[in-house]
């Protein structure tokens, strides 16, 4: 193999690696970090409202949905997240959708919110600090926090049946 062929193969491997990261390949973190205290954080919604995680403690189960506007898997999962949100409408269950901020902007997130008519709160992690603290290495990633502030589930995909999943979450 000559130098040119080696360089071509190296470029192909690099492009495939980047593509796998950007398309939200599963992070193999599913189910890990359960029964750990959730990290408190404060982020602004895309409308500018300050949200602090600890304000939900003792009141509601919190679903942190980490995503990005450029992630095809995240966009394909929007109908499932909306179904879960509506299935939990009269329950103490809050969805906080967190854009990881990487290669994104509040304006793009607002455009995505309008395009897909996202009904839940959307926060912007511009520094990536919250994503780092939760060990987010791929999107989408979902972290479920109980009323006591403990992580009870971590998912790379949402379940097909939101009502059954909610029943499972509320039984824990």
Image (cartoon, grey):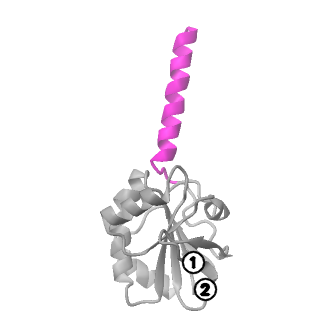
Give the side of residue 116 with respect to residue 34, left or right. Answer: left
State whether residue 170 is above or below residue 128.
below
Residue 118, horizontal then vertical, whole percent:
36, 70
1 or 2: mark nearer the eye: 1
Tell me whether the residue at label 1 lies in contact with that at label 2, contact meaning CB atoms closer than 8 angstroms.
yes
Q: Residues within 10 Å of mark 1 (few under 14, many from 20)?
A: some
- Front one among 85 and 164: 85
Residue 15 shown in magenta: yes
Q: Secondary structure at mark 2?
A: helix
**What is the span of residues highlighted in magenta in the rendered image?**
1-26
Name the residue at 53% across, 11% down: 4
Residue 77, horizontal then vertical, whole percent:
37, 62
Name the residue at 63% across, 65% down: 130
Query: Mainly helix, strand or loop, the magenta region?
Result: helix
Name the residue at 47% across, 81% down: 94
Alpha carbons under labels 1 and 2: distance apart = 8 Å
Asked whether residue 161 appears in the rendered view, the answer is: no
| Mark carried by residue 55 | 2
| Mark carried by residue 151 | none
Give the side of residue 8 with respect to residue 53, left or right. Answer: left
- Front one among 172 and 52: 52
Q: Residues within 10 Å of mark 2 (few under 14, many from 20)?
A: few
Residue 48, horizontal then vertical, whole percent:
52, 72
| Mark carried by residue 51 | 1
């Amino acid at each position: 193999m000559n130098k040119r062929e080696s360089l071509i193969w190296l470029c192909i491997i690099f492009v495939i690696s980047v593509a796998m990261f950007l398309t939200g390949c599963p992070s193999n973190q599913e189910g890990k970090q359960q029964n750990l205290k959730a990290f408190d954080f404060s982020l602004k919604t895309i409308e500018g409202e300050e949200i602090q995680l600890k304000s939900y403690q003792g009141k509601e189960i919190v679903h942190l949905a980490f995503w990005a506007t450029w992630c095809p898997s995240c966009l394909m999962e929007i109908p499932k997240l909306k179904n879960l949100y509506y299935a939990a409408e009269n329950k103490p269950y809050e969805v906080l959708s967190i854009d990881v901020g990487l290669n994104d902007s509040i304006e793009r997130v607002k455009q995505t919110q309008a395009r897909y008519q996202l009904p839940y709160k959307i926060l912007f992690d511009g520094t990536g600090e919250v994503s780092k603290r939760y060990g987010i290495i791929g999107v989408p990633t979902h972290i479920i926090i109980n009323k006591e502030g403990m992580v009870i589930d971590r998912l790379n995909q949402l379940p097909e049946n939101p009502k059954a999943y909610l029943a499972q979450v509320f039984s824990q």
